[in-house]
Image (cartoon, rainbow, N blue to C red):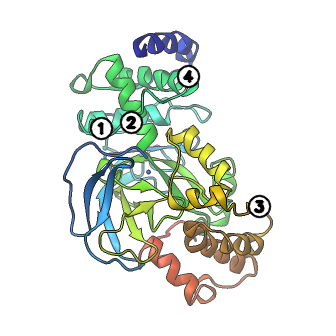
Amino acid sequence: RLTRRVRIATKRTARHTSSVPRGLPNRRRATVICARAMTDTFRVTSHPERGRCAIATKALRPGDLIISEPTLAFAINDALVRKRCAVTGCDTNDITCAECANVEHYCDGVAEGGETRLARLVAAARARDREGLAGLVSHIDDVDDETLEFATYAAALARQWWPLSAKCSTERALEDVLRCHCNAFAVLLPTPALAHHKRPAMAGLGTRHGLAKEIGLAICPKAAVFNHSCAANAFARVRLRPGQSPSVEVRAIAPIAVDEEICISYADSVGDVTARRKVLRDSFFFDCACDRCTREETTPTPSFVIEGDAAAKATALEASSDPTARLVYAPLARCLESESKGEPLSPHVGGIVLENLRHAFGPGFGEEWGDRR
C-alpha cells in the first residue's frame, strides 16, 4: 500500500521538477529509536503510550541547561538565502559569511520564492552522516497525501544533490525527508534581537505572534528525545553563533523533579484544546494527550487572541495556561513594549522578565544578539 502511495505521489510531483535549482551544490515529536541514551540530567526510557521519554535524573531549576548539542544539519529559509549565512544562520550579504566560504552548503541556484529548505536540510544531513537520521521515527504510515506529495518532491530534489557516498533508494530518501519533517527544530530569532532596518525583510516569515521570526530548520537527533506537552517544563532553541554551526539548547523553564518527564512545546499552545490538537495532528501526526489537554476535555479554558501592540500581546500571553507563552514569549513582548517607548532594553526587563528570558535563552540573554545595532 505504501509503495503505491509513493508512486502516485512521485507522479504528482513531476510538475515541481521544472523549478528545481540546477546549480551544483557546494559540497520537537517523533521520538528517537536509539535506546538507553543518558546524560547527567536525564535518561531515555520507553513508555507504552508515549514512546521514548526523557526523564530527569536530578532536580532541575528554571534556567538549568539540560542538553546542548551541535546540529547535524541546518537549512536557511529560501527567502533568506544571500541575506543570512547558509552555514551559521548569522547576518550576511552573501550565501555564506566570510568565515564559512569554504564550508559545504546547498544554496547555489536557490530562488527566493522556492521551497527547497526541507530538501537542503536532508541533503546536508545525509552528506554529513548517511545514517545520522536512521534513529528518528518518520511517521510514514500516518502522513496525509498532501504531505507525502511534498515529501516525495523534496526527496527527489535532495537525491540530485547528494554526493555518491550519501546515495540511497527512493524509499529511504522519502523516509529521511519525513524524519526531518517530524523532528526538525524551527530556528526562531527573537524579534527584539533584530535591528529595526532588518525586520521588514522578515515580515513574511513564520512568526510567534510577531515575537520571533522563523529563519530556518535544524536537525539534531540527540535533542529529539523530548516529547511534547502543552504545559511544557523546558524550552528548546537553536543557538546561532558567528563562525560556528548552530547548536540546540534545551533549558528548564519550570522546576523539574527527579523522575519527572522533561517536555518541550512543539507548537504554539495558547489556543484551546481543539485548536492545539489540530495543529499537532496536521504537523506532527499525533493526537496530544498531555495532562493539560486531558484536563481541558472536561474543563475547557478560553482561547486567547494574541493581537494588538506589544503591551496587549504581553498581557494576553501572561494570562495563558501555556507556560512557554507566559515564561518566554510574554517577556519578549515586554521587551518590544519598552522599545516602543524608547526605553533601553536592559533597565526595562529587570526583575522577573529578565530572569525568565535568561532561563529560556541562557545567562547571556541579549549579549549575543549582534544584529541589534
Indicate the quadrant containing the C terminus: top left, top right, bottom left or bottom right: bottom right
Tell me where residue 53 appears, x and y as whole percent. Answer: 33, 55
Q: Check disc 3 and give the amino acid type.
A: Val
Residue under pointer 3: 305
Q: Residues within 10 Å of mark 3 (few under 14, many from 20)?
A: few
Indicate the quadrant containing the N terminus: top left, top right, bottom left or bottom right: top left
Tell me where residue 22 appears, x and y as whole percent. Answer: 46, 21
| Quadrant housing residue 166 | top left
Is the residue under label 4 in contact with that under label 2 (CB below 8 Å)?
no
Is the residue under label 2 in contact with that under label 1 (CB below 8 Å)?
yes
Q: Residues within 10 Å of mark 1 (few under 14, many from 20)?
A: many
Mark 1 to mark 2: distance in Å? 7 Å
* Residue drawn at (47%, 30%) of the image: 142
Q: Is residue 64 above or below residue 221?
A: below
* Front in this rendered view, residue 348 or 152: 152
* Residue drawn at (73%, 70%) of the image: 316
Q: Secondary structure at mark 2?
A: helix
Q: Is residue 88 visible?
A: yes
* Front in this rendered view, residue 75 or 155: 155
Q: Earlier in the sequence, mark 1 or mark 2?
A: 1
Determine whether, in the image, residue 310 is placed left or right of residue 354.
right
Mark 1 to mark 4: distance in Å? 23 Å
Residue under pointer 4: 145
Q: Check disc 1 and give the amino acid type.
A: Leu
Residue under pointer 2: 179
Q: Earlier in the sequence, mark 3 or mark 2?
A: 2
Mark 3 to mark 2: distance in Å? 33 Å
Is the residue under label 4 in contact with that under label 1 (CB below 8 Å)?
no
Q: Check disc 4 and give the amino acid type.
A: Asp
